[in-house]
């Protein structure tokens, strides 16, 4: 055995030990530093969507509120729809309106005390507005920014929420939103709060009253007010300079068309623009929107109903007792007015009533699709949220399209052969 060689090897191992220890410590320090950086990054991301925003106070109608937000730079860009809804007068619901009962986070809707319902989906570019008792189709509005579905952290809890951009929030809900950068405040004012301020400005003028009805009050964010003076309706700007003179017995703003449905002292109705220009003559006993795309109005004259387009042209003769077949919500039976894509040409049809019997008229051509022979024409909403149309007769219920096909089947006798053939019109 070479004791000298063993001794040298032993000394070499002892000499290398401190170097290995330093290297190990250096590696562990780098790993620890990396972990700290990752934790800080996660915490930073979490804080951006945490309910307690560190940069801005959020104030709605003078009240501080706490809600989940997404920030970019120094400003709030998105807020959680569920959080903000209650503060601006809406109740939030998961799922699709009148659709399958579900807790999905992709769809939701909100509803206020004025029966306005607004539907949202993270997979769609549009939102829709409607009411519980509406007989017209939904109004669709395109978002400028896509909704975001994001998991947020509050303490030990995680929750998935739908976020809406500040820009779209202001437009859809008719809010005035301002950043007070110096004070670090995001200031939100609702319609009612804005109207209250202008009411204060004219409180001493007993001849003028600001119309606070929900649809007309929406104009306040456009710096316009519907006012009533000596019993007549008109429009002024927020400096109370006249836009439309006070000459109408009634006036109702439509958000989608931006027009007014107005009436005169004789009880006749027509349509004017938001600047007062005439669009449809004021000559009908009643007038209301039944379809938005294309824009169609239901009108009456001498207790007869018909349909006109946005230029006043008659689409369905003013000759029917009604233009809707009412449903029964308690039994999931929906009222029906417009039926989309009712035939192979994808035309729309409208339900008409004559002598308590119901039929369908083509809204494109004005032709009769189904004579007024059915006792009822209604629909049910299935589990997928789609409408299933049916007719009711003395023989019971039948699918609408099958019924139309059978009703338009005519039997022709051929005397030369004594045979019978069926011809489908």
Image (cartoon, rainbow, N blue to C red):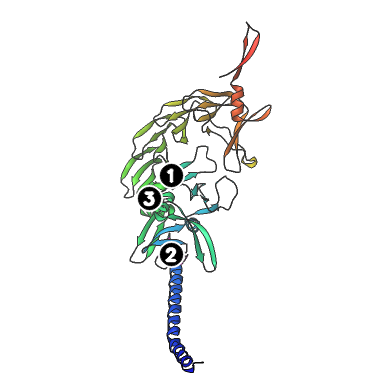
In this rendering, is residue 284 above or below 80? Answer: above
Rendering quarter of residue 44: bottom left
Rendering quarter of residue 264: top left
Name the residue at 57% across, 40% down.
Answer: 386
* Secondary structure at numbered mark 2: helix
* Label 1, residues with CA under 10 Å away: few <14, some 14-19, many ≥20: few
* Secondary structure at numbered mark 3: helix
Q: Which residue sits furthest front?
A: 1
- Estimate the spatial distance between the alpha carbons at disc 3 and disc 1, rounded to whole Å: 17 Å
**In front: 396, or 265?**
396
- Estimate the spatial distance between the alpha carbons at disc 1 and disc 2, rounded to whole Å: 29 Å
Name the quadrant of the C terminus: top right
* Label 3, residues with CA under 10 Å away: few <14, some 14-19, many ≥20: some
Residue 213 visible somewhere in the drawing: no
Residue holding disc 1: 141
- Estimate the spatial distance between the alpha carbons at disc 3 and disc 2, rounded to whole Å: 29 Å
Residue 132, x across and y down, in percent: 54, 43
**In front: 325, or 146?**
146
Q: Nearer the viewer, mark 1 or mark 2?
A: 2
| Numbered range of the magenta stretch | 46-60
Residue 398 visible somewhere in the drawing: yes
Q: Nearer the viewer, mark 3 or mark 2?
A: 2
Among the two numbered marks 3 and 2 on one chain, the one whose residue lies closer to the N terminus: 2
Residue 303, x across and y down, in percent: 51, 27
Residue 356, x across and y down, in percent: 60, 26
Contact check, label 1 and label 2, Cβ < 8 Å: no
Residue holding disc 3: 221
Name the residue at 52% across, 33% down.
Answer: 338
- Residue 90, labelled with which disc? none
**In front: 209, or 78?**
78
């Amino acid at each position: 055995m070479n004791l000298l060689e063993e001794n040298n090897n032993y000394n070499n191992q002892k000499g290398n030990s401190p170097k290995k220890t330093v290297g190990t410590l250096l590696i562990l320090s780098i790993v620890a530093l990396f972990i700290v950086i990752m934790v800080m990054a996660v915490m930073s991301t979490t804080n951006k969507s945490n309910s307690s925003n560190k940069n801005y106070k959020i104030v709605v109608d003078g009240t501080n509120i706490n809600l989940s937000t997404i920030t970019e730079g120094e400003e709030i860009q998105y807020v959680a729809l569920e959080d903000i809804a209650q503060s601006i007068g809406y109740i939030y619901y998961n799922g699709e309106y009148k659709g399958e009962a579900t807790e999905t986070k992709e769809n939701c809707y909100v509803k206020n005390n004025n029966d306005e319902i607004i539907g949202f989906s993270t997979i769609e570019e549009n939102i829709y507005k409607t009411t519980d008792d509406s007989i017209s189709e939904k109004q669709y509005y395109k978002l400028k920014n896509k909704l975001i579905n994001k998991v947020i952290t509050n303490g030990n809890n995680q929750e998935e929420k739908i976020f809406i951009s500040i820009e779209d929030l202001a437009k859809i809900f008719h809010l005035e939103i301002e950043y007070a950068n110096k004070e670090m405040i995001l200031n939100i004012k609702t319609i009612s709060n804005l109207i209250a301020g202008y009411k204060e400005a004219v409180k001493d003028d007993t001849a003028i009253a600001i119309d606070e009805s929900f649809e007309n009050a929406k104009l306040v964010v456009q710096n316009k007010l519907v006012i009533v003076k000596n019993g007549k309706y008109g429009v002024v700007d927020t400096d109370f300079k006249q836009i439309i003179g006070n000459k109408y017995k009634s006036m109702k703003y439509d958000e989608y068309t931006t027009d007014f449905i107005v009436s005169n002292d004789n009880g006749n109705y027509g349509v004017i623009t938001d600047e007062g220009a005439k669009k449809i003559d004021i000559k009908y006993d009643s007038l209301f929107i039944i379809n938005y795309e294309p824009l169609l109005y239901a009108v009456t004259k001498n207790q007869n109903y018909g349909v006109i387009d946005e230029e006043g042209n008659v689409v369905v003769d003013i000759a029917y007792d009604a233009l809707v077949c009412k449903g029964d919500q308690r039994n999931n039976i929906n009222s029906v007015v417009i039926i989309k894509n009712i035939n192979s040409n994808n035309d729309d049809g409208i339900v008409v009533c004559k002598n308590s019997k119901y039929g369908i008229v083509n809204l494109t051509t004005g032709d009769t699709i189904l004579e007024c022979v059915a006792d009822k024409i209604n629909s049910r909403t299935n589990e997928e949220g789609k409408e299933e149309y049916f007719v009711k007769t003395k023989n019971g219920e039948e699918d609408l399209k099958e019924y139309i096909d059978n009703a338009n089947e005519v039997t022709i006798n051929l005397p030369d052969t004594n045979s019978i053939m069926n011809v489908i019109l």
